[in-house]
Image (spheres, rainbow, N blue to C red):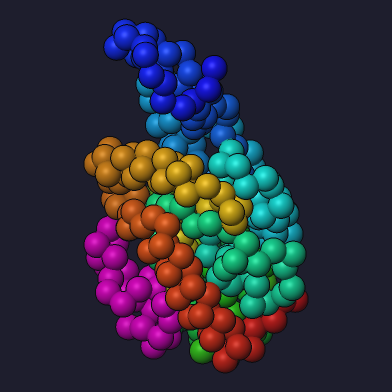
Amino acid sequence: MHCGRGFGFSVAAILAAALISAPVCAQVYPSKPIKFIVPTAPAGIGDIVARMLQQRFAELNPPVTIVVENRPGAAGVIGTNEVARAPADGYTFLVGNHGVLAMLPHLQKVPYDPLKGFAPTFLAVTVPNILVVHSSVPVKSVKELIAYAKANPGKLTYASQGVGASGHIAGELFKLHTGTDIVHVPYKGAAPAAQDLAAGHVHMMFDALSLAMGPISAKKYIPLGVTTKQRASVLPDVPTMTEEGVPMETGAWFGLLAPAGTPAAALAWVARHADELFARPTASDRFVKLGAAVPRLSTEAFAKFIQAESDRYGDVIRRANIKID
């Protein structure tokens, strides 16, 4: 059978032929499971986004299987590069973030092109950082922390989600602005860093505000300052870093990207269903109530956002002379 238009058929015959040949003439997308690679450890925001989408796609009619694979390591480079090298067929996506795409490439050579190696698909969540300290640190404010750090050079430690992650950049900016000597301790993801901070194995951290709300409520560590222009509505009593004399604005973001060259139709399909999820108050409110934003940017807008973030952090890293340890 061919897909051309025939003559001499009855209307019924034409309709029957169309129904039989439709799968041959146009491949249905998706026709197999889609893989979401998260380049960080489980339980971080990127992982939460991936698993929310996994559940959403399973509810479609017909359901679509999303396979979530965590690929931490090398500050996210391993998982990110895996996606960059994957076939551009619409069946592999990266749950990318600020670190692997806008920060780390300015700190070291990476095996992928952060701007040209991917097809931006959907920006799901943006979230500011918050400076938190373990209760064993005898301070109640940013100014007291600065004074304590200066009186005890090299004794305090700060955790980060990994080399080149937002917590690392924020920590180095804090040291630059304050002239303090604080030791960087990188982890393979936000969750293990937060766990060690809560246990008192490290002293402080610039955590993602959304992830920090639970431990703050449980009084596992103390919030000192948010890295935003205005105070966070979810923590109105916590001052901004600028209010405390340390002008800095940093944050995290998480979204879907595919290998460059992925068909536009596949990108649009995934972006549409991702947007449908985050348009729901039950999904977006989960993040908004924790101080995050849900911008819901897709394709071209997300691409411009990544370029702007890369330019901004590249400038900060150069001016601050931030180096990888």
Quadrant in which the N terminus appears: top right
Residue 24: image x %, image y %?
53, 23
Whether residue 66 is visible, yes or no, is: yes
Q: Residue at x 27, y 58 (%)?
A: 234
Task: In the rendered view, tell whether residue 145 sits above or below residue 23.
Answer: below
Q: Residue at x 32, y 9 (%)?
A: 10
Task: In the rendered view, tell whether residue 66 sits above or below residue 297.
Answer: above
Whether residue 219 is visible, yes or no, is: no
Residue 126 as seen in the image, left or right of residue 48: left
Q: Nearer the viewer, residue 281 or 112?
A: 112
Range shown magenta: 220-249
Residue 204: image x %, image y %?
55, 67
Q: Residue at x 57, y 68 (%)?
A: 115
Q: Nearer the viewer, residue 22 or 83?
A: 22
Quadrant in which the C terminus appears: bottom right
Say whether residue 229 is magenta.
yes
